[in-house]
Amino acid sequence: MINIPRGTQDILPKDTYKWQFIENKLHELMKLYNYKEIRTPIFESTELFSRGVGDSTDVVQKEMYTFKDKGDRSITLRPEGTAGVVRSFIENKMQGDPNQPVKLYYNGPMFRYERKQKGRYRQFVQFGVEAIGSENPAIDVEIISMLVHIYKSFGLKDLKLVINSIGDAESRAEYTKALQTHFEPVIDTFCNDCQNRLYTNPMRILDCKVDRDKEAVKNAPKITDYLNDYSKQYFEEVKTLLDELGIEYEIDTNLVRGLDYYTHTAFEVMSNAEGFGAITTLCGGGRYNGLLELLDGPKETGIGFALSIERLLLALEAEGIEIEQEESIDLFIATMGDQAEKYSISLINKLRHSGISCDKDYLGRKLKGQMKQADRLNAVHTIVLGDDELQKEQVEVKNMKTGENTTVSFKELEQYLKEKS
């Protein structure tokens, strides 16, 4: 027997309705904010991620699914969505769109080779949002408030928003020097990854899963102490606007996010729900002012976030929030006899084409078994077709909830069901 690959999952019909509900709700919410859907390839050139995400990140160094195609090109299954969206923005010259900033969202599978954990898979579904073309605290706050709105719209309450400023390139350069000076005397006590990061991206040491509880990490210099005047002012405006919207937040100076392209505003939403798990982060995002130029694009800025559908479902479960399944069909047709069976095939086809959902038995069950199948399918109405019904060209339509029977002619059946559905 061939089994499913490790770190992946089958989403069966008993659960797909939850995914459909979430995805439909997300699409509707995006309409409120005037964000348009973009769909990019599942695989891209490996260079896109090595340059865009950053060579020093765990994503690039350890987690990407990379292979050579038949043209000997290095191809990678996308580990995240932002780089692909930015590549598309550049390639399709969206900076020329009169509607600026360009507001986009995406939803689809991502791939990372990492250890399987609760709510984390090697293939996972990520919903993300990007606003490209504006460096304005107001658009940062729009993105953050949208994220909070999304989670609250599903009924989640045990949430915590954490924000930080990573500053602009100048601020980051000063902070990088300070971190290197701070960690150099003790770096040999850190993991190999952190030792390698000291001179490539020392900010990544702050969110290392292995060393994050070390005293040197707890006592590390704070990025907020190294922000230049512009970065300080930008962060103050973000906080002021969040306060005006009544959005509660905490400042975490060690929040640096895992990807190299972030600047200025960084944020995460966490779940405080009991039983959610040791890894409490639901979603993260931030501003990326240099990413487009890094990918040979125009001097444009952007901000966005990405959330895992799997972890959203986990948070709903932790808070005891159920997504109700409302699946039913308008009509189930039970048959008795060969002629009725033959007629039911054309009847069901006609009804489906007129917009009425219906089904029938295909296993040759007796009438009692057919009615049980109607119950399992949660049919709103049922009819029984036999020789008598065919001769009279009329049928008894039973409302399965009330038990009421109504005699309806074959000619009026379609209209009757439409009125009652």
Image (spheres, rainbow, N blue to C red):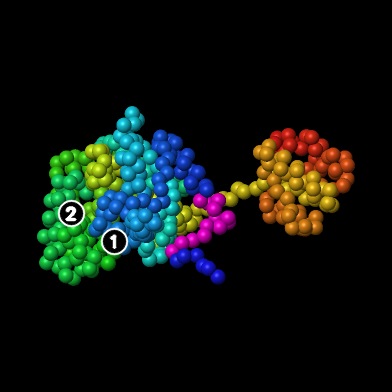
| As drawn, 267 above or below 139 | below
Q: Quadrant of residue 272?
A: bottom left
Residue 319: x and y in percent read: 46, 55
How many other residues sit within 10 Å of disc 2, few (<14), some (14-19) or many (≥20)? some
Q: Nearer the viewer, residue 74 or 81?
A: 74
- Residue flagged by tag 2: what amino acid is it? Lys
Whole-Å distance between the Cαs marked 1 and 2?
A: 27 Å
For the question of whether residue 244 can be seen, the reply is: no
In this rendering, does residue 415 appear at all?
yes
From the viewer's perspective, is 10 left or right of 394? left
Q: Which residues are magenta?
A: 7-19
Residue in view at x 41 percent, y 37 percent: 36
Q: Is residue 206 left or right of residue 24?
A: left
Residue that carries the numbered disc 1 in the rendered image: 61
Q: Earlier in the sequence, mark 1 or mark 2?
A: 1
Between 152 and 93, which is closer to the camera in this rendering?
Answer: 93
Q: Which percent across, then down, holds residue 280?
A: 36, 58
Of 254 and 353, the residue lying toward us: 353
Q: Quadrant of the N terminus?
A: bottom right
- Residue at image point 14% right, 50% down: 173
The residue tagged 2 is 222
Mark 1 lies on a secondary structure that is helix
Q: Is residue 151 magenta?
A: no
**Quick check: is 14 in the magenta stretch?**
yes
